[in-house]
Image (cartoon, helix red, strand yellow):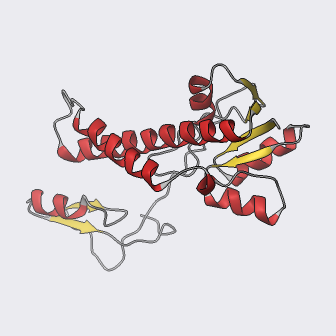
Amino acid sequence: MSKIVCVAQTVEELKFILSQSKQSLTVIPLELKVQLYCIENKIDYFNPLQYLTNAFYKYVLVKSEKFIRSLKYLNLEHHSNQIEVNAILRYRLYSILFLEELIIKIDKRTRIEKIVLSGWDKYAGQYSNKNYFISKIVKTLFKKKKIIFLSKNESLPAPKLTIHKFRIKGIKKRNNTKYILLSNLGYNFFRIVKNLKIKNTFFITEFDKDYNI
């Protein structure tokens, strides 16, 4: 029996698809929250665990590492920048391989008649959960399938830029003194502290966004 399916990265995207489509859909959840939403609201969905094996995950890890090692950075000399690029490309490759394998396996067991997509396309940041790119991936990978986009404008509006001002507590600002404000203690923190041997330099790592400077 064939089915009309939809693919959703987030609950927000799934709600949009369900509100815009008049057809009976079976969801392909790409996030645990989406799957839990389907369970809670008794929405028909495909459980990825029933279609993907441990062997597939091992294959993805090996393939991604080979891909990363094959990269040529050209003018990208700084190691920290290379790590950031690797993370972005590795995550995108994971997404492509996961989605391709999942849809192919589902199609073999239950013929997919149509694939319904939001059409959303947005990049909000490397680690943002508001990045939407699945619609384009599905469109590229499954050209022979009938695909329905529910949004004519595939690009979501960019978020409004928020500017905060800060006041540093407990430190009297001195003339000719440089202050470096770090928002977190990520992997770059100790590299920065070690390499920046600058006199009259202070590192500020904890602050309240409501403070004013």
Q: Is residue 142 left or right of residue 83?
A: right
Quarter of the image for the N terminus: give it. top right
Depth order, front residue of 74/140: 140
Point out residue 187 in the picture as x, y percentages from the top left corner. 26, 61
- Tell me the quarter of the picture where residue 147 sits: top right
Q: Is residue 176 visible?
A: no
- Say left or right for 108 vs 167: right
Residue 113 sits in which quadrant? top right
In the foreground, 184 or 82: 82
> Would you say 185 lies left or right of 4 here?
left
Residue 31 place in picture, x, y as percent: 61, 55
Q: Is 92 drawn above or below residue 205 in the view shown? A: above
Left or right, 137 with reference to 181: right
Question: Residue 106: image x %, image y %?
Answer: 66, 41
Q: Residue at x 27, y 39 (%)?
A: 66
Examine the rendering and report whether any part of residue 37 can be seen.
Answer: yes
